Amino acid sequence: MPTAPRKVPVTILTGFLGAGKTTLLNRILSERHGERIAVIENEFGAAGVDNDLLLNGGAEQIVEMNNGCICCTVRGDLVRILGELRQRREANPGAFDRIIIETTGLADPAPVAQTFFIDDDIAAYYTLDAIVTVVDALYAPTQLDDFHEAQEQVAFADRLLLSKSDLVSADALGRLRRRLLRINPRASIRSVDFGVTPIEDLLDIAGFSLDSILEIEPGFLGDDDHVHDDAVQSFAFTTLVPFDADRLQDFFRAAVASHAKDLMRYKGIVAFPGLDHRVVFQGVHMVMGSDIGRAWEPGFEPESKLVFIGRNLPKQAWLEQLAHCLVPRGVPPLARALPVESIT
C-alpha cells in the first residue's frame, strides 16, 4: 500500500532584535548536512539588508518579505509565498527539502505558527517542525520586561539558544536561565557561540506540540490579533556614494553615546572607496561590530543601506549627519532617505 508523501518540515527561527538569528541561520546554511533549504526572510523596515548578510549561495531559494511584520501585516504574504514554493517544488521535486522562516525581531511567533494549522492547503503540505528562539543573554532581562513579543518568543519556543553568554556574569546567566524556565519549562536551553551549535539541535527535532501550546494559550487556533508598540519605529538611509570611514565611525560613536538605550537595533551594508567588498555593520544598544562581507558583484554599483530601529530616535538629524559622512565629490551627495514607519 503506498505511503503518503512526507510533508516538508518548516523551522521558525525567532528571537528579539539583534539576538543573532541571521548568524545562526548562516551557521545552518554553511553546515555540510546535504539539505536543500529554502529561506523566507522577514524584515521590518524601509530597506531590507538581511539577504546581504546571508552566506552567498547558502540557500536554494531566498524569499524576502519586507515592510511589515510576518505575524500581522504581511501574514497573507506568507501563505502566498508558501503556496508558490509548493508549486516550484511540485514542478521540480529537488528544489528544496525544508524551509526556514526567519522572523523579524519584533514578531510574535504564535500567528506564524497558526498558519500551519488553520490553513488547510498549508497544513496538507507542510509540517511545523519546531520554533527555535535565540535569546540575547546581555539584553534579554530588559527586553522581557519591556516587550510582550520577547516573552511570546520564549513561551512558544521548542529550543532556546542563549547568545552572548560571554558578555554576562555567571550569576546573571543563572538568573536568566531560571526566568526562562519559569516562562517555558518545556524548552531545552543551550548556549550558542556566534551561531555555532550542533545541527541536530536545530533541524528535524519534531519539537512543536500543538497540545502543549493549547495548554499555555487555549485560544491559539482562533485568536490572531496582534498589536505592536507604536513607539518603536524604523527608518533607513541608502546611498550610491561611498562613506568616509572616519566620519561614519564618529557618527556611530555619537549616536550610541546619546541614544544607546533607545537604539534597539541597527544594521547595514556599507561601501567604502577602494574596497571591493561589502562591510557589514550590526549593533544592539551599545554593542556594535563590523565585518567584511561578500564582494560587490562585477558591474554592480555599490549601494549602502543602513537601517535603524528604536524609540524616540532623532531621524532627521541622523539622516543629515549621515549625508555628511559621505565621501565628497565636489557636488551635493546623492543620498536617498526612506521614510519612518511604525511597527504595525
Image (cartoon, rainbow, N blue to C red):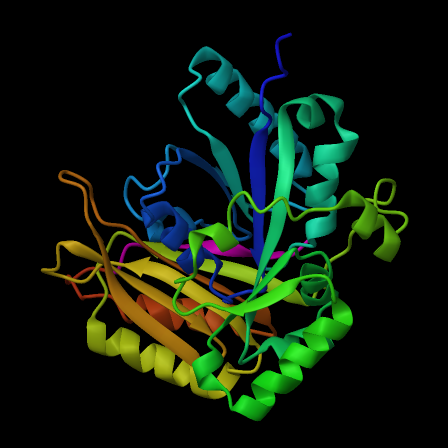
Counting every numbered tag in the picture gives 0
Q: Which residues are magenta?
A: 332-344
Task: Pinpoint residue 34: horizontal percent, then vertical percent.
Answer: 35, 36
Can residue 162 be seen at all in this image of the molecule? yes
Q: Is 249 located above or below residue 301 in the figure? A: below
Residue that sits furthest to the top in the current view: 1
User: Residue 186 at what x, y percent from top left?
Assistant: 73, 62
Does 310 sit above or below residue 293? below
Screen quadrant of the N terminus: top right
Q: In the image as oriented, which residue stretches furthest toward the front? A: 1
- Residue 194's spot in the image, x, y percent? 38, 67
Rendering quarter of residue 159: bottom right
Main SS, magenta region, reads: strand
* Residue at point 68%, 64% (across, down): 154
User: Residue at position x 46%, y 11% from top?
Assistant: 91
User: Residue 166 versus residue 73: which sits nearer the camera?
Assistant: 166
Name the foreground residue: 207 vs 71. Answer: 207
In the picture, measured across the screen, residue 53 lies left or right of residue 99, that is left
In magenta stretch: residue 336: yes
58 relative to 168 in the view: left or right: left
User: Which residue is pictured at 13% across the width and 61% down the height?
Assistant: 273
- Give the side of residue 208 with respect to residue 55, left or right: right
Q: Closest to the observer: 249 or 110?
A: 110
Q: Is residue 23 above or below residue 51?
A: below
For residue 306: magenta?
no
